Image (cartoon, rainbow, N blue to C red):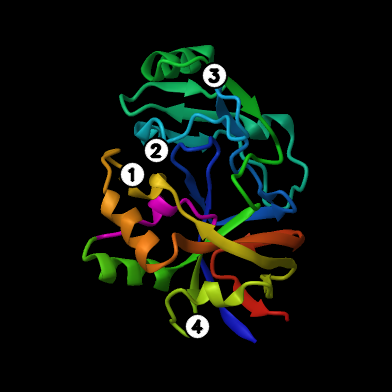
Amino acid sequence: MELGTVTRIMRFPVKSMAGEEVDDVFISYSGVTGDRVYAFLDTTKTNNFPWMTARQKHDLVKYRTKFVQPSAPQQQYPRKEAFTIQVTTPEGHTYDVTDASLRDALQEQTGVPLQLRFSEAGMQDSRPLSIVSTQTLAALEQEMGMTVDHRRFRMNLEINWKNEQPYYENELLGKTLRIGETLTLQISKRDTRCVIITVDPDTGETTPELLQHVAKEHKGSVGVYAVVLREGVVKNGDRIVLEN
């Protein structure tokens, strides 16, 4: 049974910074290749969420990131050079993500000591993949009476449901889907949202009403998380099929 198609693929090379849209990508058991492989750790934190994110520094969403020499989607085990990432600050300064000058500038702005962490497996908050539908975003716009930029939700896959039903992804919890030729995933849980969705990706200004609305009308969730059952390459326009 065909459910829809993939309309957008996103990865976020540095946690909480701006992402990049790609036409195709390999998705492993750890998620989208290159997704959240770098993160800045706040060394003053002692809890199980040590990252410096846009929750604390809203302007992080304005830092643009890109892979300098990305690996081909079919390459399951990228070479070291494939993880070379360029970061451009809101002021227009460009750094290699590993440049200590970038860390020092962020430390000065945030007032906390930072360390850069790397993990090829990625440092997502919950599950490897996050999914939101085009219909859900459109429904939120109608409910809020405002433009709702997809970048606020930082999902890996945007889906266009064939039935055009908003929030349809919520009805697929526990279901197994195949995307493209081989990628198979299971929808595992709803995506509980935080203050980051209130942050405008261009200006860093906040709209608290958006999170308040999501909490009141949608039990705090927009979109879903998924776990990968079988790895594979995903391309824009790929069909999504219900397996069981």
- Closer-to-camera residue (133/125): 125
User: Tag 1: Cα neighbours inside 10 Å, few (<14), some, or many (≥20)?
Assistant: many
Assign the C terminus to one quadrant of the image.
bottom right
- Closer-to-camera residue (119/65): 119
Q: Quadrant of residue 238?
A: bottom right
- Closer-to-camera residue (224/217): 217
Tag 2: amino acid: Val
User: Tag 2: Cα neighbours inside 10 Å, few (<14), some, or many (≥20)?
Assistant: many
Which tag is nearer the camera, tag 3 or tag 1?
Answer: 3
Q: Which mark is residue 199?
A: 1
The local secondary structure at tag 1 comes to: loop
Tag 4: amino acid: Lys
Q: Which mark is residue 61?
A: 2
Q: Residue at x 39, y 13 (%)?
A: 108
Q: Is residue 149 magenta?
A: yes
Disc nearer the start of the sequence (1/2)? 2
Disc nearer the start of the sequence (3/2)? 3
Q: Tell me, yes or no, whether the two marked residues, 3 and 1, touch with CB atoms within 8 Å.
A: no
Cα separation between marks 4 and 2: 32 Å
Cα separation between marks 3 and 1: 24 Å
Q: Quadrant of residue 146?
A: bottom left
User: Tag 3: Cα neighbours inside 10 Å, few (<14), some, or many (≥20)?
Assistant: few
Q: x, y (%) of residue 186?
A: 69, 67
Q: Residue at x 43, y 53 (%)?
A: 153
Is residue 159 found left or right of 24 in the rendered image? left
Is residue 155 found left or right of 239 in the rendered image? left
Cα separation between marks 4 and 1: 30 Å
In the image, which residues are magenta?
147-156
Tag 1: amino acid: Val
Q: Which mark is residue 44?
A: 3
Cα separation between marks 3 and 4: 47 Å
Disc nearer the start of the sequence (4/1)? 4
